[in-house]
Every structure is written in structure tokens, then in C-alpha cells.
Image (tube, grey):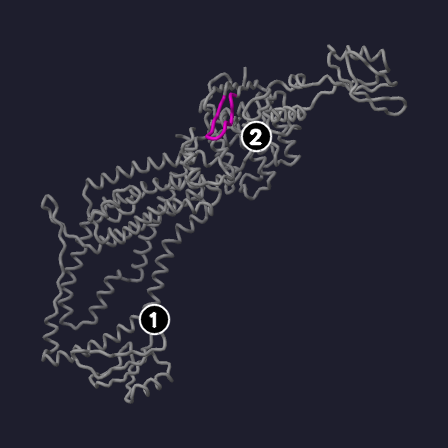
């Protein structure tokens, strides 16, 4: 036990003392927000400074009145289509829009000519311009004025309330749960993969540097394997903790310093600016309600429970896969060689990850979601993605018990391969050889 | 007391037997040569002693006690495939390896300081192993093997890859360790090492022990009663000995190789020769370990 502790310390210090650890630990939480922030900034900048696209319009129906908007400048053509095309071709303008003579009830035959493939967004915008005009024409035809129409528009928000078996009512918000499940699931997936590969790398290093035989003359191979796995896990936990602290600190202090508000608030304000005063008040009242509800929802989410489940499944999943990665590392002589064995290990992890997007976040209580979050190989990603939606206690306990059993099993299997593998170099390894190693008596 | 006694040690793998009923007795404070061609089973035996793998059958006792995990600190092992953590500093490396062998951090620090002073490598304490030359790394490796003052030191091909200066340094230290009470096992197929250093020898071939004993005993067993005589005046013999070859040197001097099949002692042969010629030198031709090794291994192969 004492020796495992020595190995854990060594593995931990080896990694934490490296400059790359310091760099990754400090920079990652700064770089990612910086990249995302930079991209958003450029996008905003571009949309603000973008010139309006010039569109030539040949309107043969005479039903349209084109006014220049922020996005489009319109040039009205009056001659025939061929002449318009010719004229358009001489310019560098964005597009030529051809509107034939059409029935309002059957708006067909519109064509847009462009020189490059236009973006979906621009086409959509143009279609919007046309649709708006046609709708107005239809309103005229039916003798409906705009005010009446505005009065018809109705928005309904379903307030989500969960009723528990005891009759207690809890409001919830699928959006928040979705985001939470999404983020936690990805975190687990990334952590297991990144640190699993670190274990494998460490084992390969020991094997190729030939230190391993010296070490195993002092400690049992199993102790060495477990020491490495636990040592690297503690590096992961430390790094994760530092990231959380930095992100929390930086985001709160930066936002505070610039007097900025959270993105949602900004969006709300923009929307408000576009509305007239009367609507504003109405919306303001509604939004205050909404914000209150959101906060209420957030407070309803059992964060302590989620944090516990997250840490449990992180450790469980990491141990389960970590042992397998250690076994792979012991079997091969180089990272390149490890590819063929890495794939079957990462496959179930990937299934859990895909399952998270395709199944769990859409239908968190369906049978697929159930099985994905029960089977130990996929449960670390799946259960963490699902937990925010509320998982029955018995399912959670079953999943946890199976995960513990799972990692004990994989650790046992991996340990048997590892003890033989680390002393074998230059052997061509395939699955048959691995099976043979597994069967060898100690 | 015996440093190590192995009785009937057997290790089988699916397709072959690595060790077949091998019994060895390694006396305390000896330098014991474990010889054998590649693949004979030496490394398997050593790994069993180091408890890296377990024997299928047989018992091993070390200094009179049954071999157990508590004896790990009693043994110092330098494997043939050796290496160090490349990214680790020399000091950290020595401390870590010594602590794994059961030393406390304080002891490990004292001992490693003592050894690096002895090997004149004090300046390297904070250097990473990857920045050391091969010879430097070998010194560090040797220190890590003996730093915990093991009573049994097992060196697998210790001189392979060592430059002559380092080999000399290591040899001196090995002898010093022996004089201070350690028992040393060499696993090697380098006969010079055996000839120079070992007092006890065992030969393993094809998973079986073929011969074991002191170097003297083995040489006596395999000597062919051949004598080289330099003498003045030619002669011919009949009876006790026969002439293998005779070549003339200058001034009526000859060198004759005699084989005495049935003589009791060299004295008997000398007595005979004095009557026949003027003897200037008389040397018994003792086989080298290398010759014994080759003849035994080949003999076995031919069977």
C-alpha cells in the first residue's frame, strides 16, 4: 500500500511539475473563451460593417415596391429578361431577381440569377422580402388590416411542472437541462479520453525506456498500474478544479470590469429596442416574470446531487477505461502500434457520446436512454447527460453498482494482460496473443 | 549459510518449458556465474527470484528463509534490458527507486549522496537522465541497483554496453560489495567475466541445469589431463601417457603436448619425463570456461 502511494505521488508530481501542465491548466480556460469571444466579435463586427448586397430586380408583375434595406440595395430593371441579364453580367453585383407575372394565390416562377453560389441566409432574406410583400397583398385582398393581424398573433409558453410521486410540484426547464446534460456529458467524454491516453502513453514510456523491469522487481505490476492510474486521476481532478476556479473568477471579474451583462440579457435588450414603447412595457413585465421563473428553475435543479453524480461517474468511467488503456499501453511498443487496440476501447465511449446527442437529450426517459445509462461502458457519459432530467433513484443506484462492478472487472482483466505485456517487447501482438497473456498463470 | 537455494524450480509456458526442474545452491559471499546461451532460461530464473513471475513448481529460499515479498529489499537487480525515467532528474530518480525498495526518504537521500560522491557525479543531481551520456546513465543505473545495500545482487549481463572505464569501475565496486558481505549473481554468456570474477558457476542449457560447482571443481571435472612440456632433447613415450603433438623449437628444444589418460598425478608424469629428457617447463593445460561451455552446449545439442 505504501508503495502504491509512492507511485501515485511520483506520477502526480511528474506531470504537475511539467511546464506543459502549467501552460495547459492556465491557458485552456483563457484560450477557449477568447477564441469563442473573438469569433463572436468578428461576426458582430462583420454584420455591422457589411455592405448591402446589390440586387437587380426585373418585376414583370408590377406588384412589388422595393425599398432599400440594411441588407439589400435594389436596382430596378425595366427592359426584358435578356437585357437585364446582360446588364447584370457587366456588374459585380450580387444577384438578379426575376419576378414573372403571377397570381397572388399561386406565387410561382420566381428566379434568382447569381454569379457565385449565394449563402442560404441571403436567399432566405430575399425570400422573406418577397413573402412579406405577397402576404400584404393577400391581406389587402381579404380586406384585413395589419393591426387586426397583429392582434391575432398569440404566443403561448408552457410552464413546465413536474409532479413527484408525493404530489410535490417542481417547475423545470428543458432548455437548461439540455444544456447541462450536454456540457457534463462532453466533459466526461473528454476527460476519460484525454487522461486515458495519458495513462497509455505513460505505460508505453516505461516500457520503451526499459525502466519497467527494475520497477516490477520492487513492486507488483498491479501496484504499478494502479499507482499510475490513480496518480493521473488526481492530476485530472486538480486540473479540473483549477479550471473551474479560473473560469469562475475570470468570467465574473471580466464581465464586472467591462460592465457587461450576460448574453441573454443583452439579447433581450436588443429585442426591446426594436419594439415600440407600448409593447415594451408589456414585454418587460412578461420578461421579469420569465427571469424570475428561470432563476426559480435553476434553484430547483439539484446541483449538489448532480455534482456528486458527475464526480462519481467521472471517476468510475475513468477507472473503467483507464485500466483498459493501461493494458493497451502494456501490449504495444509505440503509440502508433496502439491504434488497432485503441479503437475498440474508444468505440463504446463514442457510442455513449453519440447516444447523448441522438437519444438521451431528446428522450431522456426512453428505453434506449435507460440502457445507455445502465451499461457500464456507456453509462459514465450517458448517465451524467441524463441526470439533470431526473433519474429514478433505483436506476441511478443500479447504474452506479454496475459501474463499480465494471471497473473492478476491467481492472482485473487489464491487470492480467498488463503484468505480462510490460515485460514483452518486440512481440507482434494481436488479440489471440492478448488472450494467451490473460490466461497465463502468474 | 547459503544465500539462495532453489529446489526443482519449473516454469512452463503454453508452448515451451522455460525452466525444467532446476536446482541451484548459491553460497553466501560468492560471486556466482549463471551461464547459458540465449534463451536457456537464465532470465526466467532471475525473474522468479525477483518475484516478477512465479514458478509453477519448486521452492526458493533466501538466506535460509522462504522467498517472500518482504525480501524485495534484500535483492538488488540490474536487468539486461535496463533503463531509467528519461524525464526525471538523477536525484529524484535515485530517491524514487530506493524508496520503492523500502528505504525511507531520509535514508535514500543519505545513501544516494554517498554514492554520487563516490562515483564523482555530484554535479548531475539536478540533470535529467535524457541529458546524460550513456556512460553516465550506466553509473546512475548501477547506483540504483545497489543503493539499498542488498545482500543479494543480481546482475544480468552487467557489462554489456559499458565502456571499459565504467566496466572497470563497476568491477571494483562489485568486488568491494562482495568483501562487505554481499552475494553476487552474474547472469552472462561472456566468458571473460566468468573467468575473471566468478568463483562459483552453473550452466543452464535448454531450460535444464547441466553443471554446477566452484570454478575449480568444474575445471577439474572437465580437464583432459593434458600437459604442455618444454624440454631439451627429443623423446618418445609409451605406457602412462601419449604424445598429442611435438614441435621443435631452436637449439634442440621441443614443445610437446602430452595426454596422460591413466596417470595418478602430474608428479608421476614428471618423474617419467625426467628420465627421458631435460624438462624446462611443465604446465597442465586447464580448459577455459569458454571451452567447457562450448563443449557442453554443443554436446547437448548433438544428442
Most common SS among magenta residues: strand
List x then y, in percent, for residue A329: 44, 41
Picture coordinates of residue B89 (x, y %)?
Answer: 52, 40
Which residue is more in the foreground, B92 or B35? Answer: B35
Seen from the viewer's position, the closer of residues A185 and B14 is B14
Q: Which residue is mark 1?
A: A46
Residue A251 position (above or below residue A442): below
Instruction: From this view, report whether residue B210 is shown above or below residue A287.
Output: above
Q: Does the magenta segment cover residue B16?
A: yes
> Given the image, what chain letter belongs to the residue carrying mark 1?
A
Within the image, what quadrant is residue B169 found in?
A: top right
Q: Are marks 1 and 2 on the same chain?
A: no
Quick check: A87 left or right of B195? left
Residue situated in front as seen by the camera: A183 or B61: B61
Chain letter of the residue beneath label 2 in the structure image: B
Q: Residues within 10 Å of mark 1 (few under 14, many from 20)?
A: few
Q: CA distance from mark 1 to mark 2?
A: 70 Å
Mark 2, other Cα within 10 Å: few <14 / some 14–19 / many ≥20: many
Q: Is A211 covered by the magenta stretch?
A: no
Q: Nearest the camera: A46 or A441?
A: A441
Residue at figure coordinates x 13%, y 58% from the top left? A158
Residue shown at 45%/26% (left/top)? B54
Tell me the number on the disc at residue B156: 2
Q: In the rendered image, is residue B102 in sight?
A: no
Residue A174: horizontal and vertical position, in percent? 19, 54
Stretch of the chain drawn in magenta: B9-21
Q: Secondary structure at mark 2?
A: strand
Q: Is residue A235 left or right of residue A263?
A: right
- Residue A404, relative to residue B73: is it above or below? below
Amino acid at each position: 500500500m505504501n508503495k502504491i502511494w509512492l507511485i501515485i505521488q511520483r506520477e502526480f508530481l511528474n506531470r504537475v511539475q511539467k511546464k506543459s501542465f502549467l501552460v495547459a491548466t492556465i491557458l485552456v480556460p483563457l484560450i477557449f473563451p477568447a477564441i469563442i469571444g473573438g469569433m463572436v466579435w468578428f461576426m458582430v463586427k462583420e454584420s455591422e460593417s457589411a455592405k448591402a448586397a446589390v440586387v437587380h430586380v426585373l418585376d414583370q408583375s408590377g406588384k412589388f415596391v422595393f425599398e432599400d434595406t440594411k441588407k439589400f440595395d435594389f436596382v430596378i430593371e425595366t427592359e426584358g429578361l435578356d437585357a437585364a441579364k446582360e446588364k447584370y453580367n457587366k456588374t459585380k453585383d450580387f444577384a438578379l431577381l426575376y419576378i414573372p407575372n403571377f397570381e397572388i394565390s399561386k406565387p410561382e416562377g420566381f428566379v434568382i440569377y447569381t454569379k457565385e453560389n449565394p449563402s442560404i441566409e441571403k436567399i432566405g432574406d430575399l425570400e422573406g422580402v418577397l413573402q412579406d410583400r405577397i402576404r400584404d397583398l393577400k391581406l389587402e385582398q381579404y380586406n384585413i388590416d395589419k393591426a387586426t393581424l397583429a392582434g391575432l398573433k398569440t404566443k403561448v409558453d408552457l410552464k413546465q411542472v413536474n409532479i413527484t410521486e408525493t404530489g410535490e410540484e417542481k417547475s423545470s426547464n428543458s432548455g437548461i437541462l439540455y444544456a447541462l446534460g450536454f456540457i457534463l456529458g462532453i466533459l466526461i467524454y473528454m476527460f476519460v479520453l484525454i487522461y486515458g491516453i495519458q495513462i497509455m502513453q505513460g505505460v508505453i514510456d516505461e516500457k520503451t525506456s526499459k525502466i519497467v523491469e527494475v520497477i516490477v522487481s520492487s513492486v507488483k505490476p498491479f501496484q504499478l498500474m494502479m499507482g499510475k492510474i490513480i496518480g493521473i486521476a488526481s492530476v485530472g481532478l486538480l486540473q479540473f478544479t483549477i479550471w473551474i476556479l479560473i473560469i469562475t473568477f475570470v468570467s465574473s471579474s471580466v464581465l464586472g470590469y467591462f460592465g457587461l451583462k450576460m448574453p441573454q440579457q443583452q439579447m433581450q435588450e436588443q429585442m426591446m429596442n426594436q419594439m415600440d414603447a407600448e409593447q415594451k412595457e408589456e414585454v418587460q413585465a412578461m420578461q421579469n416574470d420569465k427571469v424570475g421563473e428561470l432563476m426559480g428553475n435553476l434553484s430547483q435543479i439539484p446541483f449538489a446531487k448532480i455534482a456528486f453524480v458527475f464526480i462519481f461517474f467521472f471517476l468510475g468511467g475513468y477507472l473503467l477505461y483507464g485500466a483498459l488503456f493501461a493494458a493497451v499501453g502494456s501490449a504495444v511498443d509505440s503509440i502508433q502500434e496502439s491504434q488497432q487496440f485503441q479503437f475498440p476501447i474508444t468505440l463504446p465511449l463514442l457510442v455513449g457520446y453519440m447516444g447523448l446527442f441522438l437519444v438521451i437529450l431528446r428522450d431522456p426517459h426512453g428505453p434506449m436512454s435507460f440502457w445507455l445509462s445502465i451499461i457500464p461502458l456507456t453509462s459514465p457519459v450517458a448517465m451524467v447527460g441524463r441526470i439533470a432530467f431526473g433519474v429514478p433513484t433505483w436506476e441511478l443506484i443500479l447504474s452506479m453498482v454496475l459501474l463499480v462492478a465494471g471497473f473492478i472487472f476491467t481492472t482485473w482483466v487489464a491487470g492480467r494482460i498488463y503484468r505480462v505485456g510490460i515485460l514483452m517487447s518486440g512481440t507482434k501482438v494481436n488479440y489471440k496473443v492478448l488472450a494467451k497473456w490473460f490466461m497465463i498463470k502468474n | 549459510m547459503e544465500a539462495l537455494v532453489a529446489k526443482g524450480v519449473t516454469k512452463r509456458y503454453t508452448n515451451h518449458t522455460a525452466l525444467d526442474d532446476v536446482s541451484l545452491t548459491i553460497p553466501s559471499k560468492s560471486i556466482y556465474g549463471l551461464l547459458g546461451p540465449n534463451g536457456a532460461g537464465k532470465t526466467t530464473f532471475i525473474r522468479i527470484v525477483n518475484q516478477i513471475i512465479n514458478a509453477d513448481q519448486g521452492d526458493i529460499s533466501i538466506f535460509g528463509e522462504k522467498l517472500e515479498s518482504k525480501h524485495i529489499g534484500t535483492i538488488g537487480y540490474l536487468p539486461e534490458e535496463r533503463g531509467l525515467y528519461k524525464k526525471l532528474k538523477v536525484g529524484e530518480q535515485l530517491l524514487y527507486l530506493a524508496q520503492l525498495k523500502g528505504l525511507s526518504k531520509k535514508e535514500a537521500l543519505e545513501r544516494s549522496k554517498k554514492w554520487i560522491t563516490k562515483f564523482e557525479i555530484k554535479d548531475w543531481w539536478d540533470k535529467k537522465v535524457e541529458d546524460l551520456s550513456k556512460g553516465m546513465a550506466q553509473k546512475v543505473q548501477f547506483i540504483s541497483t545497489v543503493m539499498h545495500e542488498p545482500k543479494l545482487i543480481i546482475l544480468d549481463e552487467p557489462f554489456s554496453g559499458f565502456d571499459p572505464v565504467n566496466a572497470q569501475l563497476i568491477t571494483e565496486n562489485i568486488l568491494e560489495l562482495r568483501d562487505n558481505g554481499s552475494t553476487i549473481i552474474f547472469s552472462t554468456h561472456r566468458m571473460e567475466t566468468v573467468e575473471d570474477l566468478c568463483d562459483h558457476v552453473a550452466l543452464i542449457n535448454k531450460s535444464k541445469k547441466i553443471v554446477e560447482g566452484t570454478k575449480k571443481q568444474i575445471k577439474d571435472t572437465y580437464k583432459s589431463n593434458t600437459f604442455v612440456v618444454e624440454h631439451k632433447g627429443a623423446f618418445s613415450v609409451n605406457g602412462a601417457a601419449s604424445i598429442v603433438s611435438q614441435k621443435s623449437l631452436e637449439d634442440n628444444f621441443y614443445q610437446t603436448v602430452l595426454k596422460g589418460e591413466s596417470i595418478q598425478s602430474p608428479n608421476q608424469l614428471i618423474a617419467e619425463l625426467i628420465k627421458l629428457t631435460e624438462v624446462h617447463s611443465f604446465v597442465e593445460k586447464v580448459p577455459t570456461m569458454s571451452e567447457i561451455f562450448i563443449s557442453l552446449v554443443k554436446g547437448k545439442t548433438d544428442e
